[in-house]
Image (cartoon, rainbow, N blue to C red):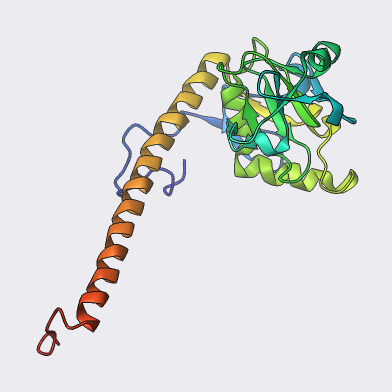
């Protein structure tokens, strides 16, 4: 592990619970480098139940109100999370007729266009959904959706996915880009531990960022108030400097 990563992001102090693995080996993948000795490299097609593309076609006549079935699109895929602020709904008739694009908790969806390559795992709160023009990785007993979402959204995989689009329609990620994609493969229990660690550490970082942003906001308010007080003569600063 690099010296930069083995630091507490907020304070710069060493993080004692972060340490390198005992031994590493060459991954055999040029752009990946070394991996822990007990990890493997597998193609996605060997660790997921199925890889497919959501519904592709005309869908306008099937849109309905919020009493329908959730329809997830590229715009609903954030980094490591499904965005539900602006979600569409389709009729149950459409949902029943298009089982291939059904989504269940633990599935991973990947944006095919726009900000292509971004991935999110379907959370437990979404018990029934369909999808439009996104790549779907079906959950399996070999993979943690949370872990592989974090893998796909990491810088190294995002760079590779974008580079791999050179031979396809510009800006589009297809199943062929994903089925042969080589990924790190720790055992499922370790995948879950890693995912939990990332979530825990990310929450601490987010809390620190929020606190600093609040402090910046208060300082900006103080500066604004100070300027107002000084320029209107409420404060005598003739001997302040």
* Quadrant position of residue 34: top right
Q: How many marks?
A: 0
Q: Residue 77, how many percent across, how many down?
A: 65, 35
- Depth check, front residue: 30 or 145: 145
Instruction: Say whether residue 174 is left or right of residue 47.
Output: right
Position above or below: 5 against 142: below
Report which quarter residue 200 is drawn in.
top left
Is residue 41 rendered to the left or right of residue 125? right
Q: Please name the residue shown 78% across and 21% down the image.
A: 45
Residue 143 visible from this viewpoint? yes
Q: Does residue 26 appear in the picture of this structure?
A: no
Q: Does 73 sit left or right of 225 as displayed?
A: right
Question: Where residue 33 sits in the image (x, y, percent)?
Answer: 63, 40
The foreground one among 38 and 48 is 48
- The quadrant of the picture occupied by the C terminus is bottom left
Figure check: 115 above or below 45:
below
What is the x, y in percent for residue 65?
70, 24
User: With respect to residue 70, does 231 lie above or below?
Assistant: below
Furthest residue toward bottom? 238
- Residue 84 image position (x, y, % from top left): 60, 31
For the residue pair 209 and 164, the one nearer the viewer reads as 209
Q: Is residue 46 above or below residue 74?
A: above
> What residue is at 68 percent from the left and 12 percent from the top?
140
Residue, x 69% and y 39% (percent of image)? 75
């Amino acid at each position: 592990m690099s010296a930069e990563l083995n630091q507490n992001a907020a304070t710069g102090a060493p993080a004692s619970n972060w340490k390198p693995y005992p031994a590493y080996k060459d991954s055999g993948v040029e752009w990946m480098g070394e991996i822990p000795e007990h990890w493997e490299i597998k193609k996605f097609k060997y660790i997921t139940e199925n890889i497919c593309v959501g519904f592709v076609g005309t869908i306008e006549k099937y849109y309905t109100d919020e009493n329908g079935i959730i329809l997830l699109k590229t715009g609903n895929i954030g980094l490591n999370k499904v965005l539900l602020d602006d979600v569409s709904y389709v009729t149950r008739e459409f949902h029943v007729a298009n089982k291939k694009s059904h989504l269940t908790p633990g599935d991973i969806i990947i944006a095919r266009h726009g900000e292509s390559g971004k991935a999110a795992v379907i959370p437990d709160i979404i018990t029934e959904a369909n999808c439009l023009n996104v790549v779907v990785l079906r959950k399996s007993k070999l993979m943690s959706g949370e872990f592989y979402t974090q893998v796909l959204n990491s810088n190294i995989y995002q760079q590779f996915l974008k580079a791999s689009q050179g031979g396809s329609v510009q800006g589009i990620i297809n199943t062929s880009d994903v089925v042969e994609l080589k990924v790190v493969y720790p055992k499922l229990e370790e995948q879950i531990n890693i995912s939990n660690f990332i979530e825990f550490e990310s929450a601490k970082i987010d809390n620190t960022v929020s606190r600093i942003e609040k402090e910046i906001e208060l300082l900006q308010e103080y500066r604004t108030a100070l300027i107002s007080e000084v320029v209107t003569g409420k404060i005598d600063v003739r001997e302040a400097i």
